[in-house]
Amino acid sequence: MSQYFKIGKLAASFGLKGELVLQHSLGKKTILKGLETIFIEQGKDNLMPYFISTITIKNDAEVFIKLEGIDAKETARKLTPKEVWITEADFKKFAAKAAPISMLGFNLINEEEDLGEIIEVIEQPHQILCAILLDGKEALIPIHGESLDKIDQKNRKVYVTLPDGLLDIYR
């Protein structure tokens, strides 16, 4: 089974013909040209495919998206606010290398200790939170200028130096 990556959410309906506003975190200048399918969460662990008719850029982090079979504002409104996912292959194609979301799937390394795979990236104004599974529990690890040492794209690793005691609250 393919792996899926959460890229954002359908924030609002737009216009009368069923267009939607997709807020994504794929990085600046991502126009999603050639993306054919998105997956929308329909209940826990259930992703439903929707085929794309058109995509138009709104700004760096938003696009107007028209989905096949969604032809009215009322139908579109039922899809908001829902999370949007794409396949791993599409994610690799459309995520900007410099975008924080590109760290999904990388391993987080703290002073030579492999903490695990980054399963979610949450962007905030002054830092990025990376969710990992640490000893079976979800842990949110802050990544910012002081804690980030380097990102190794080739080996898919993010090296950090975390403050003493931060990991203790999860163990």
Image (cartoon, helix red, strand yellow):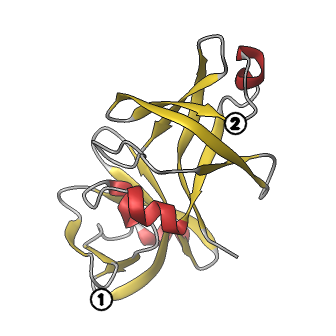
Q: Nearer the viewer, residue 136 or 151?
A: 151
Residue drawn at 53 percent across, 67 percent down: 88
156 relative to 68, above or below: below
The answer to whether 9 is drawn above or below residue 169 in the figure is above
Q: Amino acid at mark 1?
A: Glu
As drawn, is 65 to the left or to the right of 74? Answer: left
Q: How many numbered markers are drawn?
A: 2
Observer-nearest of 107 and 74? 74
Name of the residue lying farthest toward the bottom: 112
Label 2: how many Cα within 10 Å (few below 14, some 14–19, many 20+): few
Q: Position of residue 127 (x, y in %)?
A: 30, 48
Q: Quadrant of the C terminus?
A: bottom right
Rendering quarter of residue 79: top right
Where residue 93 appears, as percent x and y from the top left, is 40, 62
Which of these two is toward me, 68 or 47? Answer: 68
Identify which residue is drawn at 50% across, 68% down: 89
Name the residue beneath numbered marker 1: 112
Left or right: 97 in relation to 149? right
Q: Is residue 144 visible?
A: yes
Q: Which quadrant does the N terminus fall into?
A: bottom right
Which residue shows up at 73% across the image and 28% down it?
70
Amino acid type of disc 2?
Glu
Q: Tag 1, which secondary structure? A: loop
Q: Nearer the viewer, residue 151 or 136?
A: 151
Residue 140 appears anywhere in the view: no
